[in-house]
Amino acid sequence: MAEKATGSPASFVDQSVVPGDVVLDLTSMANQTIKLGGGLRQDCDAITAMKAGTLKFSKPNKYWVETSQKRYVPCAGDSVLGIVADSKADNFLVDIKGPTIAFLPVLAFEGGTRRNIPKFEVGTLLYVRVVKANPGMNPELSCIDASGKAAEYGPLKGGYMFECSTGLPRMLLSSPRCPVLEALGKNISFETAIGLNGRVWVNAGSPSTVIVVANAIMNAESLSGVQQRIMHDNSRSASIVAVKLGLLHRRRFFMKVQCDSTLLTSDVQHHVPEFGSENYTIDVEIRTWVPL
């Protein structure tokens, strides 16, 4: 049986917990209202952990367990990246990498009316907010914030989306700002959409910049903040930092890029047929290796 939490709530914040641990005792928190995030549940007068991780707190009154895992468990308030799987009369069915498919009402948009229903094709990438996430029910999504504005939510066009563990997005969204994003933002112009469901979208002015930024973000998960800062301090520009981060681990993936034939290396040019145009869409294999 789990031990009773005897210390103050603050004494358990940033500490490791496992399922069954009593992290908060409500009898010692009279006249206080708290919000429970993912990984916690209430058992009578005790708040217990449901998964292993680190207990976190954000002002004014929210507690949750932060962990890194492959499987995403939807939680109300999460901003996630979803892929449209199907469309119905009243809802869009959206894959958010959870245990069940989520639904997005056609009116859950800024200024949404029956005469102004958005049209999304299957496969469209959306940045959405989880409104309801009850056990045994399909999560409900929305493309507006709490004030009814679209803000950053909506369809994402172009760019490149990759999947990762649920711990990386939380690290990227942490405060103070994640060192790798701070380093990249110095000299590289790009935009990102970070989903707490383990999906990250990156877009930039050129395919090469997208590749560099995506590699740097993916590899940052295995580096501590100190290691990221050391690489930043020892580099002259943020682009060099990104390249160094991208070379730390062996990675291999394919992506389609549209490029000018004059930018192709000699070993690639002879594979490109002469279509009478200088622009081509080709499959490019990206490899990064551990330096010797």
Image (cartoon, rainbow, N blue to C red):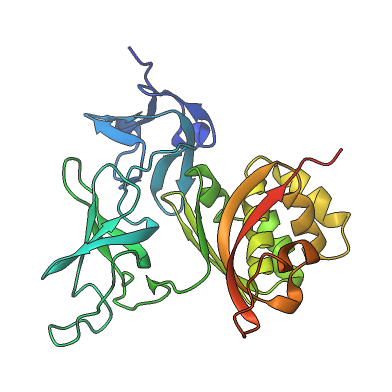
Residue at 34% across / 29% down in the picture? 50
| Residue at 72% over, 67% down | 270
Q: Residue placed at 45% from the left, 74% from the top? A: 157
- Check the picture and name the quadrant holding the C terminus: top right
Looking at the image, is 195 positioned above or below residue 64? below
The quadrant in which residue 241 appears is bottom right
**Percent position of residue 183, x then y:** 74, 61
Kindly indicate the quadrant of the structure image that contains residue 23: top left
Looking at the image, residue 80 lies above or below residue 257: above
Is residue 203 left or right of 226 when viewed as pictured?
left
Residue 225: horizontal and vertical position, in percent?
71, 46
- For image coordinates 16% across by 46% down, the residue present is 137
Does residue 178 appear in this view?
no
Between 202 and 270, the one nearer to me in the picture: 270
Residue furthest top in the image: 1
Number of numbered tags placed on the structure image: 0
Query: Which quarter shows the N terminus?
Result: top left
For residue 154, say whether it is visible: yes
Coordinates of residue 122 in the picture (x, y in percent): 29, 65
Q: Is residue 58 left or right of residue 105?
A: right
Left or right of 220 on screen, residue 57 = left
Give residue 173's position: percent from left, percent from top: 54, 56
State the residue in front, 135 or 57: 135
Residue projecting furthest to the bottom? 115
